[in-house]
Amino acid sequence: MSVKSALILESLTQAVRHLAFVIPAGLGVQEASLVIFGHVLGVSSELALAVSMAKRMREVLCGLPSLLSWQWLEGRRLQSPMRTSS
């Protein structure tokens, strides 16, 4: 796979993902577009899915610390005694 093909594949995939913004996290959209456009560019379906899973893993690893810290803060807020004003 050439650099030109990789850039075309990434550009088309991102374009489709942005068009499908109403689908939460673009679930299935990224995978389908990578397989379809990868097939057109001569990339095997297995490689296209592997690239898609690597991209998803990056999203999860970048988002997980934020979600965990949010959960921790909310848990602390709920466990603290309620303050009442008199």
Image (cartoon, rainbow, N blue to C red):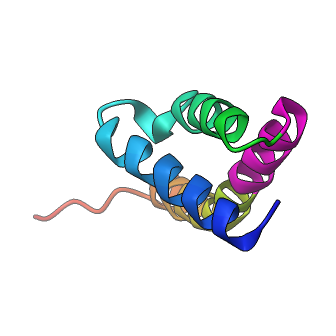
Query: Where does the C terminus fall, quadrant-wise?
Result: bottom left
**Which residue does the image show at 68% across and 62% down from the upper left?**
6
Q: Position of residue 31 (x, y in %)?
A: 65, 34
The magenta segment:
44-57
On the picture, is 38 further left or further right than 70? Answer: right
- Residue 84, compared with residue 44, is above or below; it is below
Residue at 85 percent of width and 36 percent of height: 44
* The residue positioned farthest toward the bottom in the image shown: 3
Q: Looking at this rendering, what residue extends furthest in the left direction?
A: 86
Q: Residue 36's spot in the image, x, y percent?
A: 62, 30
SS majority, magenta: helix
| Image: 18 above or below 6 | above
Task: Based on the picture, tell me whether residue 14 belongs to the magenta stretch.
Answer: no
**Residue 66, picture quadrant:** bottom right
- Residue at coordinates 57% horizontally, 39% vertically from top-left? 30
For the residue pair 4 and 47, the one nearer the viewer reads as: 4
50 is within the stretch colored magenta: yes
The image shows residue 12 at horizontal and vertical percentages of 48, 50
Residue 4 appears left or right of 57: left
Decide: is 1 above or below 19. Answer: below
* Residue drawn at 61 percent across, 28 percent down: 32
* Quadrant housing the N terminus: bottom right
In the image, 50 versus 72, the foreground residue is 50
Q: Quadrant of residue 16?
A: top left
User: Percent from the top left, x then y, of residue 23?
Assistant: 38, 30
